[in-house]
Image (tube, rainbow, N blue to C red):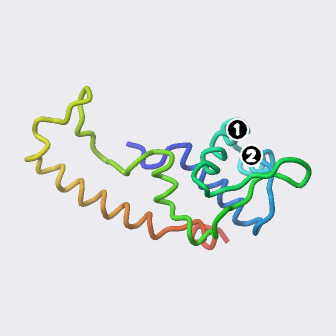
Amino acid sequence: MKLLTKHTDYAIRALLVLAKKNNLFVSARAIAKEQNMPYQFLRRILQMLIKHKLVVSKEGGGGGFKLNKPPKSIPVEQIIEIFQGNVQFSECMFRKKICCNHAACVIRKQIQKIEQIVVSKFTKITIATLLRDSI
C-alpha cells in the first residue's frame, strides 16, 4: 500500500520550493532541476496545482510559478486529495459493486477510525510546517 504517490510527493516538493522562494516566480525547469524531477511530469503537476488555485503562473521573462496562498494555509491533506482522492486503506468495492459484507465488516470500521486519524494529522501538516522542518 502506498500512502503517497509520486504525483503527491512531487507536488509537495514543488510547493516547498515555491514557498522557499518567498513569493517570487520560479520556472518549472528550475524546480525540476533542484528537486531532480522529470520536467514534463512536473509541468502536469503544476497545471493541477493551478487548477486548484494553489499556484499561479506567469509567462515570459521573469515568469514561472509561485504560490497563490500562504504556505500555512496549504495542508498536505488537500494535496493528497487533489492527486489521490480521499485517504483510503481498504477497498470495499469489487467490480464497481460495494462488498456484500460492507455494513457488518468489523475490520472496515477499525480501518475507518485509522483513516480519520491519518486525515486529521495530514490536515494539521502544512507546507509551512514542512518548510520549517526542512531547515
Q: Is residue 72 above or below residue 51?
A: below
Q: Residue at x 59, y 65 (%)?
A: 127
What residue lies at 91% left-to-right and 50% top-to-bottom? 61
Mark 2 lies on residue: 32
- Dot 1 surroundings within 10 Å: few (below 14), some, or many (20 or more)? few
Left or right: 102 with respect to 39?
left
Q: Residues within 10 Å of mark 2 (few under 14, many from 20)?
A: many
Apparent side of residue 69 relative to residue 32 in the rendered image (left or right): left
**Which badge, 1 or 2, comes first in the chain's sequence?**
2
Residue 49 vs residue 88, the one in the foreground: 49
Q: Position of residue 19 (x, y in %)?
A: 69, 65
Q: Which residue is mark 1?
A: 38
Relative to the observer, which residue lies in front, 43 or 59? 59
Q: Residues at badges 1 and 2 in contact (C-beta under 8 Å)?
A: yes
Q: Amino acid at mark 1?
A: Pro
Quarter of the figure that contains the C terminus: bottom right
Is 6 situated above or below 19? above
